[in-house]
Every structure is written in C-alpha cells, then in structure tokens.
Amino acid sequence: MIVKIQSGKISGKIDAPTSKSSMQRACAAALLNEGKTIIGNPGRSNDDLAAMAVIDNLGAKVLQETTNELVIESKGVKPVSREMNCGESGLGIRMFAPIAALSDQEIIINGSGSLLSRPMNFFDEIFPSLGIKIESNHGKLPIKIKGPLKPVDITIDGSLSSQFLTGLLMAYGKAATQPVTITVNNLKSKPYIDLTLQVMKEFGYSVINHQYESFEIHPVNATSHQPKNYLVEGDWSGAAFLLVAGAIAGEITVKGLNVFSSQADKAILRALTMSEAVVSIAEDQIVIGSGKLKAFHFDATDCPDLFPPLVALASFCEGTTVIEGVSRLAHKESNRGLTLQEEFGKMGIEIKLQDDLMLVEGGKRINAATVHSHHDHRIAMACAVAALKANGETTIEEAEAINKSYPTFYSDLKSLGAVVF
C-alpha cells in the first residue's frame, strides 16, 4: 500500500487511539480471570486482534463485542488448540508464553513477520527452571512448550525487554500458592512494569515491588467470580505522533489521554516542553501548537518506542538533538536506529549513531521524498508526520504497517486537515 502526504497545516480536535499495551494486558488478565471480564474502550489494532485470538486459543471466549465494550468469559488457561499465533506482537509472545505454560498441554507458539527473527533465548534459559519443557528453533520461533509452570524464586535479566517480566508476573500471580520472588537485574522500561502491576492490581493480584530489583508475588483468593471491569487507556505511544504533528504543523487538541498514566511514552510531554513547543495540559485534553522549536537532549532508554516521533520532532528543531538509548532499538519491528537514519536521510535529515546516542541535525529544509516503512508501524508514522512540513509531496511505501498499532492513523490526520491519499 502506498500513501502520499502533502505539506500543509493541521488543526482541530482528535481522540487518542486506544493503548495496545493496556489492551493486550487486559486480554491476558481476562483469560486468567475465572468468570466474566468487561473491557471498555477495546482496541482493534493488529496486535490487539492477535491478543484476542491467543486468548481464544487458550480457552477464553468473547461473549459480546461492540465498539465500546468487550465481554469475555474464561475458566482459566484451558487450551482448545495446540498452537497459538501472536502475529507480530513482541509483547504478545513474551507475555503469553509463560501464561500458556500454566497448562499441562503441549503448545506450539508461533508468530509472523519480523517476530520470526527476534530473539527468544529467554525462554530457553528460564523455562526449564520453572518445570516447563521447551523446544525452540535456536532461540527463534516457533517454540514448543509443555507445562505446567511451577512458580519458584528466580533471577532474570531485564536488560533486553521488560515484556518477559510482564508475562512471568501475570503467570506467577495466577499460579502462586505461597509467596515467591522474581529478582531482576538491569531492568529496562520500568514504566511498562508499572502498567502491568496496575492491571494486576485491578484484577485482584498481590505483588510487592522492591525498587524494581525484585517482585514478591503473593497467593490470592480465587473464589470470587464477580465480573471484572477494566477500561483501556488512551495510547500515549500513538498519540505521541499526533502531538508532534501539532508541534510542527499547527495547533490541535488531543483528547482521551490520562496524564497520570503509567505508560512510559507519556514522557513525550517532557520532550515537547524541552523543545519549547506550545503545550497546554488539562485533565481531559492536551492542546499542542508550534513554536520556534529548539534542539533538546532526551533519555529514551525507558521509552524506546518514542524514538520515531522524537526524530520527527528533532528534524524541525534548530540545532543538534541528542537522544539516548539507541541500544534498545535493535530488536524492534526493524532495527530502528538504522532505519530512522536511512529514511530520514532521504528527507535531508542527517542522523548520526554514536554508541548509545542518536544525534539529529535539525532545523533545515525537509525534502519531500519516497520513503519506506520497513514494515515498521512507527517508522511509517514518523515519516508521515515529518511529511506534513516537507517541501512537497511525500510517498510512503508499505504504508499499511500502521495497522499493527494505529489503523486509523492516516484517517485521523485527514480529519485534522492533512492532505493524505
């Protein structure tokens, strides 16, 4: 799919997309909840749909589905299929694998696209110590597992991704019959763990966080079968692109974001303030407009998904912007450090990679160009945002990559007055 975007101003009001991080965790919690779960504001991205397919394979059923609500019924992890497919969702594979292992049935775990090449060595290293049999494809998908998982005190490496820990916390929360501790070395993306713990708390689980160095999971009383209600938050990751678009191409109002959210990508507000964009924050909306943008220094180690919108923002900031945390980008849908360098280079933006730093030379003319998403949703959106102030018409190839997280992104830009076709 090819999308073309013309330079121009935007204005108006827009609702933030639904958080896939929140939605996928809600699906996992609904599977583990023995009874009914009502999920409000459910997402419909490819990753969300993959999560719904996984819990269906593992025994949960959607009883009712409307635009505003999902009603899910579950009796716990009772697989109805020998295989579960997580699509291209990194969170999905890392979170649902330990949860699937609560069953004593043999399950083949698979994925598609870029997920097939992403490292899964964590499971080979950790699962045997939890009583889980595992056969993997040299640390890649597909993998075959057979539980049941037995919660024991363990120590894990949290430097690659916090998503492995999310899955273990949720599986331990369900299976623990006595207090058990997960110790974590060098944990990255701590705010995502805050989101996991928030969801678990709403579903009645008891986890004590010891300064992100260890997590003490306590057994819970599972006798209550009262329906659980969970409202999925607006997505700061997707909304970051809208906010940056407002900062460079006109004043807009973004609604539906929780300024008290645990989501890591809420940090985009800090970057926008540092760049001297015009930002007005209220409880129910954020008004963002363009000012004379200046370069900034930002540490994105705990929020690596912000790199693409930060690069789009930095492209219009006078001077050299420095973004820390490049090491977190290698195992995304693409190698985002190199991909951003290549695609923004086509638009005349020089990006240098130095150890763990990305240096973006901004404030110069942005050239209209033909760019490629590399099948990465965030690269497609970053290029689209930059195109709003390029010197002509920009063409994005493989533009459908946005469906992974934000399927209405282009139509939302159009609703704000952007010329997209």
Image: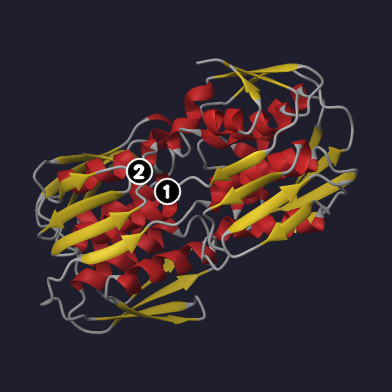
The 10 Å Cα crowd at callout 2, few under 14, some 14 to 19, many 20 or more, is: many
- Residue at the far front in the pictured view: 12
| On screen, residue 420 above or below 19 | above
The 10 Å Cα crowd at callout 1, few under 14, some 14 to 19, many 20 or more, is: many
Check disc 2 and report its element: helix, strand or loop: helix
Which sits earlier in the primary sequence, circle 2 or circle 1?
A: 1
**Left or right: where 107 falls relative to 179:** left
Find residue 363 and name its label.
Answer: none
Closest to the observer, 250 or 205: 250
Image spot of residue 419 (x, y percent):
65, 21
Asked if the residues shown at circle 2 and circle 1 are in contact, with their CB atoms under 8 angstroms apart, the answer is: yes
Image spot of residue 393 (x, y percent):
72, 16
Residue that appears at 78% across and 29% down: 389
Residue that appears at 51% across and 27% down: 375
**Left or right: where 347 falls relative to 29:** right
Here the colouring is secondary structure
**The image quarter in which residue 180 lies:** bottom left
Q: Is residue 355 visible?
A: no
- Name which residue type carries label 2: Asp
- Name which residue type carries label 1: Lys
* Residue wearing tag 1: 20
